[in-house]
Image (cartoon, rainbow, N blue to C red):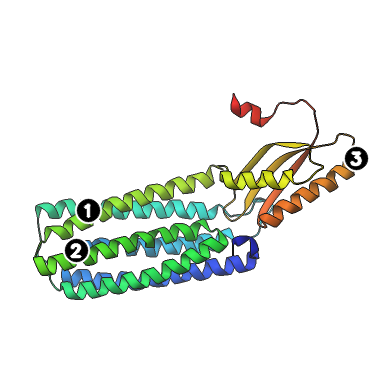
Amino acid sequence: MSSTYLTKEISDRLKHRAAVASISLAVLLSGLKLFATIASGSLAVFSSMIDSVSDVLGSAITFVAIKYSTRPATDHHRYGYGKAEAVSALIQAFFVAGSGLFVLYDAFMRFFHPRVLDETPLAIVIMIFSLVATLILIAYQKHVAKLTQSQAINADSAHYVVDILTNASIILSLTIVKFFEIYWFDTLTALVIAIYLLFNAYQLVVEAFDVLLDRELSDDIRKNIGDIISRHDFVKGFHDVRTHSLGNEYMIEIHLELDGRLSLFEAHQLSDQVEAAIIKAYPNAQVIIHQDPSGVAEERLDERLKR
């Protein structure tokens, strides 16, 4: 099943539920990891706690962005508010990057000032619980993101994918500290987590800017749009196809080449058939078609881009 079979109401409802689930888990895990950090003194657990706190803020931003992005279009925002999700992803990226830099600083400091850890069994139990709970949330978020194509939910899920790796590495680190007393391994784990957080933040920034700067949709989608257009025998050709994401919708513009002898009414009817076929494949798309008489010489965007 894909997002093309969902109504906007169902899509919005799923996104809201996923956002609420994310906030609830982030708050719970932040509290548990804070307790584990105080009890054990582990920098690795502390780094995970900082990440969970950033998840609380990020998930709250996601929730607000989803509420905002699902508002209907207005006179002043006729494309709607879908790009609020990309803004949300960008803000989350800064939270992730800030968390990474904070942990990175602490990791370097602890290399010079090592610390003996206490209560590692308790910390291990809490981290195992965090791992299992996060796996369940990610599975739900991925399901919702696949159905709704929500960039905000996908960005929020990226935080928790990182958490799976960090939780697993922290459990390993605490186990090594407990049984082998290699205390610097805890600091090394925190350092690796910090670097990964910074890389994850970079990826979120790139994806958010792709939407905010109107990057073309994927080659697969553009090819499929071309195939849909070409299935209509009355189409003599098409050019200057432009596409981009509005966050929760696709924007598709096409110059359609038709028989120049057609009346305006006939050309309009034929264009409506093409538009309907595209919307059937991408129900949340906005499609704008400009009719051109076939064979007319004119400057085209496709040609300008090749220069």
Q: Amino acid under label 1?
A: Leu
Q: Circle 2 is placed at which residue position?
A: 173
Q: CA distance from mark 3 to mark 1?
A: 69 Å
In the picture, residue 28 is in which quadrant?
bottom left
Quarter placement of the C terminus: top right
Where disc 2 sits, the SS reads: helix
Q: Amino acid under label 3?
A: Ser
**Residue 272 x %, y %:** 80, 49
Foreground pick, 82 / 151: 151
Q: Is residue 119 visible?
A: yes
Q: CA distance from mark 2 to mark 1?
A: 12 Å
Mark 2 or 1, closer to the camera: 2
Q: Circle 1 is placed at which residue position?
A: 191
The residue under the point 38% across, 47% down is 202
Neighbours of disc 3 within 10 Å: few (<14), some (14-19), many (20+): few
Disc with the residue nearer the chain's start (3 vs 1): 1
Disc with the residue nearer the chain's start (3 vs 2): 2
Q: Circle 3 is placed at which residue position?
A: 263
Whether label 3 touches label 1, CB < 8 Å: no
Up/down of 268 relative to 279, above or below: above
Q: Amino acid under label 2?
A: Ser
Dot label at residue 199? none
The residue under the point 69% across, 29% down is 300
